[in-house]
């Protein structure tokens, strides 16, 4: 019986070692080449998931290599808590609710009530539009009279609504994919929703979307807030290149989960201004994305 138990234990340990080596190799290669090959870039989004598995697998290695592996894993986990400090300043000019409400959401009345209860100054919503959302949009526009939208029967519908008058609000496109630029006195809000990289064509479209929008954002002189479902995570080299080119930085911690199916942080709040902004993920509603309330 003991021989059988030891044999099983050895097999499991060998498998864990093999999987740990494979995962570390994949994570390293994906970070190095993810900018150029979209299947590798997809792997980068699961960096934290893979790191936790490798941390467990580290128990099966000999002591010297085990500690080296653990240091690597703990470093990556530590980086996932960046930014490490968030503003606690309660003085703010504007509150913004950003939310992928999910186009096929069957709980429209509940979602409308939730949105109104947040009492945000500005709403930045994606996947809301077309005939399915006509009633809810009409009600929102009564409370938020200043708005502009890409109002179509598609998950790429989007709208920015404000209680207060905007200097301008415009819908722009990168190919067929929209983004909204809403300008207020001395501040600008961008609402983004690039396509998900589910195949090579859409991955290339997403890359072009980021390149185009990054150039526009980098040339913005106002204080800046960039929100939306980016279909990308802070672990991706494409994401890091985007925020570097756009000259913006994260308000949410890297590991803040906002999308249920894969437990990924793809809904982001980015900014460029003198003072740090405060972003608070709210409780899950009936969308597969988590709403985020930002004060700035």
Image: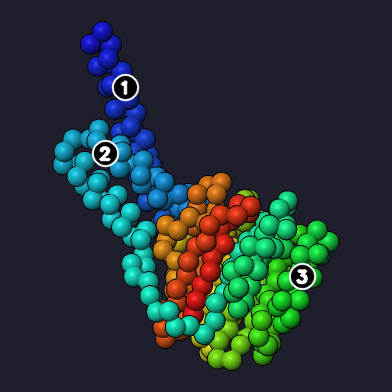
Report the number of numbered marks.
Answer: 3
Q: Earlier in the sequence, mark 1 or mark 2?
A: 1
Residue at screen point 61% across, 64% down: 99
Residue at screen point 67% across, 63% down: 113
Is residue 86 depicted above or below 286 in this figure?
Answer: below
The scheme the figure's colours follow is: rainbow
Q: Nearer the viewer, residue 132 or 145?
A: 145
Q: Earlier in the sequence, mark 3 or mark 1?
A: 1
User: In the image, residue 224 lies at what x, y percent?
Assistant: 52, 82
Quickly name the residue at label 1: 11
On residue 139, which mark appears? 3
Locate residue 232 relative to residue 140 in the image: left or right: left
User: In the image, residue 168 lies at what x, y percent?
Assistant: 69, 87
Q: SS for tag 2?
A: helix
Quickly name the residue at label 2: 58
Q: Nearer the viewer, residue 7 or 145?
A: 145
Q: Residue furthest right?
A: 131
Mark 1 nearby-residue class (10 Å; few <14, some 14–19, many ≥20): few
Res 114 → quadrant: bottom right
Locate residue 244 relative to residue 95 in the image: left or right: left
Res 134 → quadrant: bottom right
Q: SS for tag 1?
A: helix
Is residue 167 depicted above or below 120 in this figure?
Answer: below
Mark 3 nearby-residue class (10 Å; few <14, some 14–19, many ≥20): few
Residue at screen point 21% across, 41% down: 66
Q: Nearer the viewer, mark 3 or mark 1?
A: 3
Report if residue 208 is visible in the image.
no
User: In the image, residue 64 lies at what x, y percent?
Assistant: 16, 42
Locate residue 211 relative to residue 29 in the image: left or right: right
């Amino acid at each position: 019986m003991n021989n059988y138990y030891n044999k099983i234990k050895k097999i499991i340990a060998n498998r864990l070692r093999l999987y740990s080596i494979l995962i570390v190799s994949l994570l390293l290669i994906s970070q190095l080449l993810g900018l150029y090959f979209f299947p590798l870039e997809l792997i980068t989004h699961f960096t934290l998931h893979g790191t936790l598995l490798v941390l467990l697998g580290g128990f099966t290695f000999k002591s010297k290599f085990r500690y080296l592996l653990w240091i690597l894993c703990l470093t990556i986990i530590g980086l996932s808590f960046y930014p490490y400090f968030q503003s606690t300043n309660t003085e703010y000019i504007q509150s913004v609710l950003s939310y992928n409400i999910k186009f096929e959401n069957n709980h429209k009345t509940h979602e409308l009530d939730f949105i109104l209860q947040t009492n945000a100054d500005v709403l930045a919503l994606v996947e809301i539009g077309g005939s399915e959302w006509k009633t809810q949009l009409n009600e929102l526009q009564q409370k938020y009279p200043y708005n502009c939208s890409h109002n179509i029967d598609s998950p790429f519908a989007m709208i920015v609504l404000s209680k207060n008058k905007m200097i301008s609000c415009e819908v722009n496109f990168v190919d067929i994919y929209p983004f909204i630029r809403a300008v207020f006195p001395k501040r600008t809000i961008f609402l983004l929703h690039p396509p998900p990289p589910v195949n090579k064509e859409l991955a290339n479209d997403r890359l072009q979307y980021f390149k185009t929008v990054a150039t526009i954002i980098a040339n913005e002189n106002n204080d800046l807030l960039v929100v939306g479902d980016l279909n990308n995570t802070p672990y991706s080299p494409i994401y890091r290149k985007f925020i570097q080119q756009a000259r913006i930085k994260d308000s949410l911690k890297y590991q803040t989960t906002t999308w249920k199916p894969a437990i990924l942080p793809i809904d982001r709040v980015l900014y460029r201004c003198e003072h740090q902004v405060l972003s608070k993920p709210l409780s899950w509603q009936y969308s597969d994305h988590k709403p985020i309330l930002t004060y700035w």
